[in-house]
Image (cartoon, helix red, strand yellow):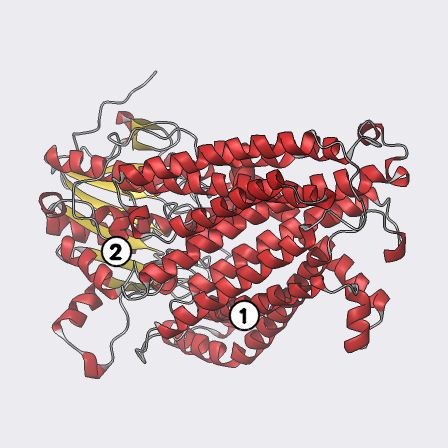
Amino acid sequence: MDHRDGGGHAGADGLVELRVHGVSATGPDDLLDRPHVQQVAGDHRGGFYRPRPENREDGEAGAVTLEAYRWNNLPAGNALRTLSMVILLPFMLINLAIWMRPAGAGSDPVIKALCRLLALTLTLMYVLSIVGVALDVVAWKCMSSAECLAGRSWLSWLGGRPAGLRLAVLALAPAAGISLVWGLSARPALPADVFRAADQPRAADRLTAVGRWDNEPLVGRLRSIHVAAAFAVLDLSLLGARSAQGLSIVTVALTAAAGLLLITCAVLLCTPPLTMPTELRLDRLVGALRTIALALTVLVWILVLTSSDSWPERNGLPGYNLTIVGLFIGQAVLLAALGVVLFWHRGRDPDVAPTLGFGALASSVAAISLAITFSAELVYRVSDFLNRGAPTAEALITSPPRACVWAILGFSLAVLVTLAVAGVVSVASRPGRFRAASASVARDFPDAPADATPRLRQVRKTLARARFTERLLPLAVLYACLAGIGMAAVALGLLPTPPGELVQRYVGLPVSFVYFVIGVGSYLIAALILGLVIGGIFAHHTPGFRRYVGVLWDLGTFWPRAAHPFAPPCYAERAVPELTCRITHLVDSGNAVVLTGHSHGSVLLAATLLQLPPRVTDRVGLLTHGSPLRRLYARLFPAYVSDEVIHEIADRVDWRWVNLWRETDPIGGRVFARHGPDKASAASDREATVDRRLRDPYAVTPPSGDIFPPAIKGHRPCESEKAFTDAVRDLADQLR
């Protein structure tokens, strides 16, 4: 039975406290701290809940009606969707890069174009990885070897058949892979007019760009371009193999058409009209481009299928290794160009971290290196399986392309070096972090008894660990540089010398050791993929585990698809307008609203407040706790979460804003930067009233009637603490 009534009424004074959870929420009953709740708006994926009438405490004067917004099913969904997000992780990371660009409009068009071109290379790599398995390893190598087909009835039925027939049949696998991601990205969304935000001027470089439905035309155009490019690279792979028979007019014409189609796709990604909300001519052009690509694929497939002449089957699929190496080199060039542009437009403010804005490079390299390792591991594992575990390179029947082997070696070395540097940084920064932690402990617990020494030591360790967060971005930039060098080294795959012999000749390491490292790296990549799958499933079914793994999904799917159309859908396009609609309804019903957001919930509320009209924000107060707005988002997304944006949020609510933070929290922190004595001003005085530091733990000795000291809460919500209740009361008094 549905008990929804719209929830327009409130307590005696017309006050509603609307709570928005973070990534670790369990359910609306825990969020509201009430045993029985009912849904008053929304659906099963995202909705608003209130305590049932018999559990409400709003009967007395001055009470606040509790309401909770549950959104954690929007990015997570069912287990199948979680698994698809793991597979689409590289697409999500490259889409994240375009939002991590530095502030300033001067470099925006170039950075956006480079990110979209890098996103296109990921789609091409996705197709080429399936081509490598289906066409190169299986159709070309294994099916032409009696030793490989022996005892494999599921493959031998095509063995001995003409190469054209084998390639045509196995080409259906990459075509199906393209159709799969095409279908996943084109799932029907809710009508645009259902969750449309308030009409406001479009802002390109502020948090208001999140949660608006005018991004849908861009996604549709990107989808058509990527689908056309994906089929074009499949056509070129088939035509490259067909050219082994000798060039003909038809083959040359189709190759030229596929190459021109691919170039057109790349050019369109760099054109400014791509992002226009209404551009009918461009919509017709990209639609025609996709249709031409599909028709071209059918023609190429028929050409390959009807080829009756003998094909010279030696080495590997003609042109495949060269194509892979060329793609890797192209990605390295684009990454180098992106790094140069980011360095040239970096922030030169001495008070700003020098790595600010380089998150776009780190995210791009992470996406590409992950895609390369996924692709290389897929080809390598299938080859190893078909080889029946051949112990030496000479015994291999279906050896993977050398470019894939170099990719695995480069990824392994980049990860190992980054981990080694991270260990050095951790040890080197340990004294400074512990000195700062000791100062905090001495300030908070000056009169701690002697028997509290073990507990004080544990608090110091927690504080020191929490301070390591600021060093993660420089380490990510270091990994980006190392992985970029490793990608450039993939060009060695063009050499006829195997990797083991080349390393032995110029480095001196034994061949057996090199292949041992490659094998270990391959298993590490397989473990990484398996860990991501298991982590995604556990994050869906286990709320406690979601606190650690869900951060990645919620961060990545918060931002709209602006670079890669096959990235997971953006849940903020529903959550932000839904919050906007609900808050507006509550205010128009005569209520004042205190918004409380924990962790990522505070970011959702910040984006929502920037969408609300002034008549609504005049009746709204804001309470954030464990907020990553400044500590993480201002560092990772400087063009969208800046000092100006944070001040605008405060101005919108007339500085009715309280932010609770703990030093033991590795994610949340202040929302306003500290100001020295020389920068004191009226603005900084108002900022000081927003940030309220909570002592954590509140004591280091067991309270009366207990044998355990209070827990260290870190990033946990604050709803059960007195400081939270006091802050809500203060904001409610201001609104009354």
Residue 383 sits above or below residue 78 on the image: below
The residue lying at 16 percent from left, 55 percent from top is 656
Residue 733: give its label.
none
The residue lying at 65 percent from left, 67 percent from top is 489
The residue lying at 50 percent from left, 75 percent from top is 450
> Please, which residue is most extreme toward the front here?
249
Residue 638 sits above or below residue 32 on the image: below
Query: In the rendered structure, which disc, 1 or 2, sits on the residue that comes first in sequence?
Result: 2
Residue 312: x %, y % from top left: 80, 44
Query: Which quadrant holds residue 647?
Result: bottom left
Q: Nearer the viewer, residue 349 or 430?
A: 349
Residue 370: x %, y % from top left: 58, 54
> Please, which residue is most extreme toward the top here?
1
Residue 206: give its label.
2
Query: Which quadrant holds residue 176?
Result: top right
> In 3D space, how far apart are the residues under numbered discs 1 and 2 (Cα atoms)?
29 Å
Pointer 1 local density, CA inside 10 Å: few below 14, some 14–19, many at least 20: some
Relative to 295, 341 lies left or right: left
Relative to 127, 144 lies left or right: right
Is residue 262 in sight in this rendering?
Answer: yes
Q: Nearer the viewer, residue 194 or 337?
A: 337
User: Callout 1: helix, strand or loop?
Assistant: helix
Residue 204: x %, y % from top left: 26, 54
Q: How many marks?
A: 2
The N terminus lies in quadrant:
top left
Residue 382 sits above or below residue 474 on the image: above
What amino acid is at disc 1? Cys
Query: Which dot, 1 or 2, sits closer to the camera?
Result: 1
Residue 481: give its label.
1
The residue lying at 35 percent from left, 27 percent from top is 43
